Image: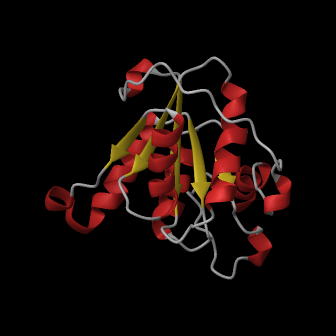
């Protein structure tokens, strides 16, 4: 899992949840710290603008690389967001990529939807079914997203319970770590 903009564990005054009894706090910290971006300075100043993708299907079965993008609704740094996405996808040269995100009007979810439209990448938007699942709808949606992704980019502020949930679920089902 690639966790972006996560504060150092020691700096978080609200404890992070540990995904399961069989995953120790140290194992969880190692997942998080492997891919932590401390500041904007940890990213390259210039990034290669991606070439628009030919494959436009939004069917996960058509892709080997499926990147889930999640994050707090308060995330507003478009410049860093763009640099993170462009830097991350460079590792998948000549492989079609599908992005998956929650349907939102703000934050990282909205930014990836707009980014995909601008740069010619497919993005599957997944909405929670509030009528069927009530208050647990967003968490059920996170289950579906985690089960279909190969990577997760989480723009996490250390507090968002929804973002923490998708991180926890992705770790539990061994979404590959960097």
Residue at the farthest bottom position: 13
Query: Which residue is at the front of the view, 171 or 89?
Result: 89
Residue 11 % position (x, y): 77, 77
x 77%, y 68%: residue: 8
Residue at the farthest left position: 131
Instruction: Note whether 10 is above or below 114 in the view shown.
Output: below
x 27%, y 59%: residue: 137
Query: Which residue is at the front of the view, 84 or 53?
Result: 53
In the displayed structure image, the side of residue 102 where residue 34 appears, left or right: right
Q: Dividing the image into 4 quarters, which one contains the C terminus?
A: top right
Residue 124 in which image quadrant: top left
x 72%, y 53%: residue: 27
In the displayed structure image, the side of residue 39 where residue 169 appears, left or right: left
Residue 98 % position (x, y): 48, 31
Residue 143 % position (x, y): 39, 48
In the displayed structure image, the side of residue 85 where residue 140 appears, left or right: left
x 54%, y 37%: residue: 119
The colour mode here is: secondary structure
Q: Dividing the image into 4 quarters, which one contains the N terminus?
A: top right
Residue 82 % position (x, y): 64, 49
Instruction: Note whether 61 is above or below 101 in the view shown.
Output: above
Number of marks present in the image shown: 0
Instruction: Note whether 56 is above or below 176 in the view shown.
Output: above
Instruction: Note whether 87 is above or below 65 in the view shown.
Output: below
Query: Which residue is at the front of the view, 1 or 106?
Result: 106
Residue 147 in which image quadrant: top left
């Amino acid at each position: 899992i690639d966790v972006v903009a996560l504060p150092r564990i020691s700096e978080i005054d609200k404890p992070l949840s540990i995904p399961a009894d069989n995953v120790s706090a140290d194992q969880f910290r190692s997942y998080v710290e492997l891919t932590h971006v401390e500041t904007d300075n940890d990213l390259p100043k210039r990034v290669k603008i991606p070439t628009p993708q030919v494959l436009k299907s939004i069917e996960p079965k058509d892709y080997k690389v499926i990147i889930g993008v999640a994050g707090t609704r308060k995330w507003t740094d478009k410049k860093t967001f763009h640099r993170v996405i462009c830097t991350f996808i460079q590792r998948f040269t000549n492989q079609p990529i599908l992005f998956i995100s929650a349907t939102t009007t703000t934050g990282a979810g909205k930014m990836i939807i707009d980014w995909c439209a601008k740069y010619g990448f497919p993005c599957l938007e997944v909405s929670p079914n509030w009528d069927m699942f009530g208050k647990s709808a967003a968490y059920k949606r996170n289950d579906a997203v985690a089960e279909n992704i190969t990577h997760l980019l989480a723009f996490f502020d250390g507090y968002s319970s929804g973002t923490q949930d998708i991180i926890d679920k992705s770790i539990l089902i061994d979404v590959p770590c960097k």
